[in-house]
Image (cartoon, helix red, strand yellow):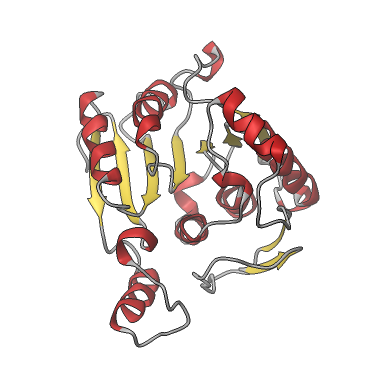
Amino acid sequence: MKMVWNAKEMSMFVISCPVEVHRNLIYRRDDSLELNDIEASNRFNIDTTGLVCCWPSEEVLAFYCINRSDMFRSKRVLELGAGYGLAGLVIAASANAGEVVISDGNPQVVGYIQQNISINAETFGQTKVKPMTLHWDQEQASDMLNSFDIIVASDCTFFKQFHQSLARTVKSLLKHSETSQAIFLSPKRGDSLNKFLDIIKEYDLCYELIENYDPTVWNLHRSYVAGDDTSWPNYNEEHCYPLLVRITFGHFV
């Protein structure tokens, strides 16, 4: 994947994808929050992490999806807590999906998503792509209920106060089908991921937790842990390495 950034790249998982997908990604240049960011956070009960940067888990999710593009073909796909929407944009450009909805609960972030969709529109082919302000605590529109074949998300399980609403959102929006699934990539971050998985079970959803889901990502992770690669000096497995969680309504095949 050839990434074209208009600001300093802040993440450390730099992985070469097997196909060339030219992508322009706009995000904020500032490393600090502004007063209107805090005001939006308080008003909508959302965190502001989506305004900071493109996070490593989002890059890994994008890499994972582009290597498995066939699974998205002709599907209706939703990205939750998308930040600047890298994974959704990659799916839209490479997978011949039917529709990709890239969502975030922060209206300011959704504005950036719209810009990123607009500047990359020529790469989407026949795939419909749209941004959406989607707050997990709010009741979703009836035409969205149980309508998505695949839901993807990265690093969305950090804040425990959102676990209930996140699980409820997945259950309400994921299509009731043997092939539908939600794909989360999330670091452990202490006990946050495990707490979320407990909530998933409370909502009668099934999950599969996979540590080694891609050889390239796994080998890079192990080289950081062993100290063979020192390009990420503060690498911490609990906070940096995203585990794969597959969520379904039934048993895995």
Query: Taking the image as drawn, is residue 251 in sight?
Result: yes
In this view, the residue in front, 36 or 184, is 36
Q: Is residue 114 left or right of residue 136?
A: right
Q: Is residue 26 left or right of residue 251?
A: right
Q: Position of residue 139 (x, y in %)?
A: 49, 14
Please state the total of marks drawn on the protein image: 0
Q: Which residue is found at the position 66% from the left and 53% from the top?
A: 32
Name the outermost residue toward the bottom.
Answer: 228
Q: Position of residue 58 (x, y in %)?
A: 51, 55
Name the outermost residue toward the top.
Answer: 142
Q: Quadrant location of residue 225? A: bottom left
In this view, the residue in front, 242 or 175, is 242
In this view, the residue in front, 79 or 190, is 190
Q: Position of residue 237 (x, y in %)?
A: 31, 66
Q: Is residue 99 above or below residue 223?
A: above
Q: Is residue 173 above or below residue 98?
A: above
Q: Which residue is found at the position 29% from the left and 45% from the top?
A: 193
Q: Is residue 120 left or right of residue 152?
A: right
Q: Which residue is found at the position 71% from the left and 35% from the top?
A: 36
Quarter of the image for the N terminus: give it.
bottom right
Quarter of the image for the C terminus: give it.
top left
Q: Which residue is found at the position 57% from the left and 31% from the top?
A: 105
Query: Taking the image as drawn, is residue 83 in sight?
Result: no
Q: Quadrant location of residue 195? A: top left
Q: Position of residue 54 (x, y in %)?
A: 59, 56
